[in-house]
Image (cartoon, helix red, strand yellow):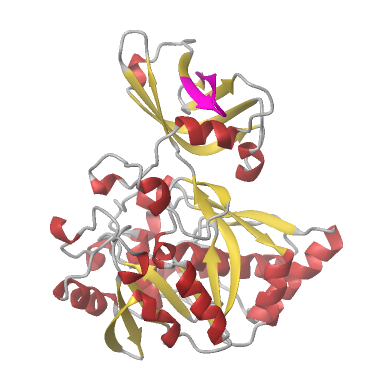
């Protein structure tokens, strides 16, 4: 287990690389599973197509997917003067901080947001927009309730209309800023996994974008188990690291949801666990650390601080012990699911507790995701990325994929 003193020595400049603009995939491939796939196994690299991935997953393994669903989180309002105000939904404040509860609310919600053109939005001014729902015109209203915190209250006409329906009708797909283009109709479906289910993300869990129903079926037929968790990907995933000492980077928090059956299956599973995406990996590792909190400290608040895993523990429980502690707590409280948040920062020196392999795309230079890949590949990320660049792999959200096995 790496200690805090070691973590503080990690320098951002060691995780930079040159990513030419032409290597960034601006649009998705026609067929999701036709993307390229690098496999990194025991120090060796091989090149494949994504639809071949079932060949490389051992029978009896468990693949864990993030079933979050991207919401059209970019809302554009126009003032009477003609000025446009962009409101980007970041995280809910009222009536709850739990995303699933806010999305089904039918009256009034408040979100922390990013506001473009804020200076032109006057105090107490209510912005209005027209939307069509079930063939009927409705009005959505936006009002700033806390300017310094950029908290915006949304109300709307119509009865029994959940906020998720309002957003679906009014919003634009929040494709990543580095694509440098406007969202298209195609992005509504392609910037979404085929198994997306729980609305609340403002960015896609992009490793999952390569999976098709046919690939998922091939995995099932091979005897690969599948489990689903929910981590609502936040805009913080695009936040660049600006600190040379990366441990001082203010890591973003993301909300996770696990159901009882999934945790039971994880606790009982004895073979390989493959995280589909860095979001699934963050969630699974965070779940382990929640079990540590429950078992060793008697804590039941599911919030994982950024550097908690690097604390000085005398002895840590095995994966099964940690998950079993959570199950005992859930049974005691009669809980069928638990919701938590994580700021966990996985970087070189991290000791992985749950995941044996990772399916992931190719990430931006000097990012928290590069740090995670570097940690998982024991520093061999640069070898993998150089190989991908040399072989014309497509990078970032709509780019190609990798299957990385831990050492």
The quarter of the picture where the C terminus appears is: bottom left
Q: Which residue occupies the foreground of this view, 140 or 145?
A: 140
In the picture, residue 202 is in which quadrant? top left
Q: Relative to 58, is 401 on the left or the right?
A: left
Residue at x-position 30% and y-position 57%:
28
Give percent across and percent down for residue 327: 76, 69
Q: Is residue 275 above or below residue 133?
A: below
Q: Is residue 124 above or below residue 213?
A: above
Indicate whether residue 133 is drawn in magenta.
Answer: yes
Residue at x-position 50% and y-position 58%:
306
Residue found at the very far front of the displayed protein = 135
Q: Which residues are magenta?
A: 130-144
Give percent across and percent down for residue 383: 23, 79
In the picture, residue 278 is in which quadrant? bottom left
Q: Relative to 81, is 95 on the left or the right?
A: right
**Could you tell me what secondary structure mostly forms the magenta stretch?**
strand
Residue at x-position 15% and y-position 63%:
18
Indicate whether residue 156 is drawn in magenta.
Answer: no
Mark yes or no: residue 296 visible.
no
- Tag count: 0
Mark yes or no: residue 215 visible.
yes
Q: Relative to 66, is 362 on the left or the right?
A: left
Give percent across and percent down for residue 326: 73, 68
Give percent across and percent down for residue 143: 51, 18
Q: Which residue occupies the foreground of this view, 377 or 61?
A: 61
């Amino acid at each position: 287990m790496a200690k805090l003193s070691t973590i503080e020595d990690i320098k951002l400049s060691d995780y930079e690389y040159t990513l030419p603009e032409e290597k960034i995939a601006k649009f998705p491939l026609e067929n999701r599973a036709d993307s390229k796939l690098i496999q990194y196994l025991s120090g060796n690299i091989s090149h494949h197509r994504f639809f071949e991935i079932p060949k490389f997953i051992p029978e009896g393994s468990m693949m864990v997917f993030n079933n979050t669903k991207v919401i059209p989180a970019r809302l554009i309002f126009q003032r009477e003067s003609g000025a446009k105000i962009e409101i980007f939904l970041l995280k809910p404040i009222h009536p709850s901080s739990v995303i699933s509860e806010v999305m089904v609310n039918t009256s009034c919600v408040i979100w922390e947001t990013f506001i473009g053109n804020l200076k032109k939005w006057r105090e107490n001014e209510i912005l209005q927009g027209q939307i069509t729902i079930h063939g009927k015109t409705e009005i959505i209203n936006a009002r700033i309730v806390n300017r310094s915190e950029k908290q915006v209250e949304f109300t709307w006409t119509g009865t029994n209309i959940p906020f998720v329906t309002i957003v679906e009708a009014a919003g634009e797909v929040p494709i990543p800023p580095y694509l440098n283009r406007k969202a298209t109709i195609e992005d509504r479906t392609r910037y979404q996994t085929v198994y997306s289910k729980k609305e609340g993300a403002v960015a896609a869990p992009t490793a999952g974008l390569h999976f098709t129903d046919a690939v998922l079926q091939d995995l099932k037929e091979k005897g690969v188990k599948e489990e689903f968790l929910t981590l609502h990907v936040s805009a913080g995933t695009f936040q660049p690291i600006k600190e040379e000492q990366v441990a001082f980077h203010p890591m973003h928090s993301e909300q996770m949801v696990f159901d009882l059956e999934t945790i039971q299956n994880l606790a009982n599973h004895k073979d390989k666990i493959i995280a589909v995406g860095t979001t699934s990996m963050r969630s699974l590792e965070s779940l382990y650390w929640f079990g540590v909190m429950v078992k060793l400290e008697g804590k039941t608040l599911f919030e994982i601080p950024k550097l908690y895993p690097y604390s000085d523990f005398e002895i840590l429980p095995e994966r099964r012990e940690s998950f079993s502690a959570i199950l005992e707590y859930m049974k005691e409280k009669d809980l069928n699911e638990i919701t938590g948040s994580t700021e966990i920062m996985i970087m070189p020196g991290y000791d992985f507790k749950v995941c044996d392999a990772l399916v992931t795309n190719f990430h931006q230079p000097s990012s928290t995701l590069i740090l995670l890949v570097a940690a998982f590949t024991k520093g061999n990320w640069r070898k993998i990325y150089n190989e991908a660049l040399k072989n014309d792999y497509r990078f970032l959200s709509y780019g190609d994929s990798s299957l990385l096995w831990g050492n």
